[in-house]
Image (tube, rainbow, N blue to C red):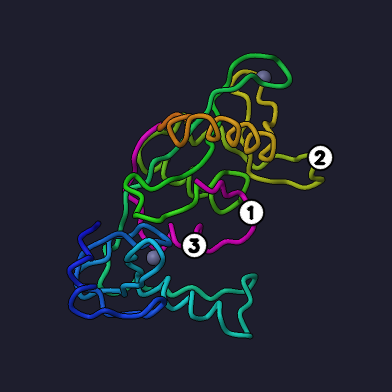
Amino acid sequence: MCRFDSARDRTRPQEGERVKNRFAGGCTRCSVLVMPDGGFLRKNDEGWEAWCVTCQSLDELAESEDFDPENLMLPTVPPSGSATTLDLRVLGMTRACWKCGENTLCLIGLYPNRPARGYVGLHTTDNEKTMELCQLLAEREGRAELAAGVKSRYSRTMRERQLANGCRRCDALQGNFPVHEEALGRVASGGVDGLDTLFVASCPVLEWQAVIYDFGGGVIAI
Ligand SMILES: [Zn+2]
Ligand SMILES: [Zn+2]
């Protein structure tokens, strides 16, 4: 059913077995392109999955007793045998401001431009790391008008300062959670295309994996 099938005929590994990867493919966990002889292949019910070295080692760590997602030490170098960048869709959504009623554009999240087979996860800006990366990518792409809408603002609901979208007309804070909830509704009916792709940016793998491995919430399974 896929390009990994020929490997199955040769090696016939058992369910859950991990073998050296001989084909290029996107990492199931993070969508980074894994080169031939880089990363690992894993078999599941539906066939073969490629895993980059970083995701493979973190997945093994997750099975161990001292796994602590709050204090995860991510590698400081990109996974060997994989691409060092990947293209991300920076997603936006226009919605009515709760205060002035005017339509305003919010930065809502990130999704791989070419998601790997089996990849799950639209990361929304109801997460500080995702919001920071959205803003950073907008700045790098020269989209200052998009980056400028995001500021550290005091949320009375959350009782803390947080990076959040603001209304482009009246500057009122557009709460990260309500924006996430509205995005969830649009994604439920229209998939990723239920949101607007503002631009596609090349992102260093390490920056993206820091978002993937932040367990502070703000993920839509898709
Ligand atoms: Zn990966
Ligand atoms: Zn407003």
Expressed as whole percent of the image width and height from the top left, the position of residue 99 reads 73, 19
Mark 3 or mark 2: whose residue is earlier in sequence: 2
Q: Is mark 1 within 8 Å of ligand 1?
A: no
Expressed as whole percent of the image width and height from the top left, the position of residue 197 reads 40, 32
Q: Is residue 131 visible?
A: no
Label 2 CA crowd tier, 10 Å (few <14, some 14–19, many 20+)? few
**In this view, 132 is above or below 213:** above
Residue type at mark 1 is: Gly
Circle number at residue 54: none
Expressed as whole percent of the image width and height from the top left, the position of residue 73 reads 53, 76
Q: Is mark 3 within 8 Å of ligand 1?
A: no
Q: Read off the residue under disc 3.
A: 210
Residue type at mark 3 is: Ala
Span shown in magenta: 198-222
- Say whether marks 1 and 3 touch (CB < 8 Å): no
Residue 93 located left or right of residue 179 = left
Q: Would residue 209 be counted in the magenta stretch?
A: yes
In space, the residues marked 1 and 3 are separated at their CA atoms by: 13 Å
Which residue does the image show at 47% across and 35% down from the upper left?
A: 191
In space, the residues marked 1 and 2 are separated at their CA atoms by: 17 Å
Mark 1 or mark 3: whose residue is earlier in sequence: 3
Q: Read off the residue under disc 1.
A: 217
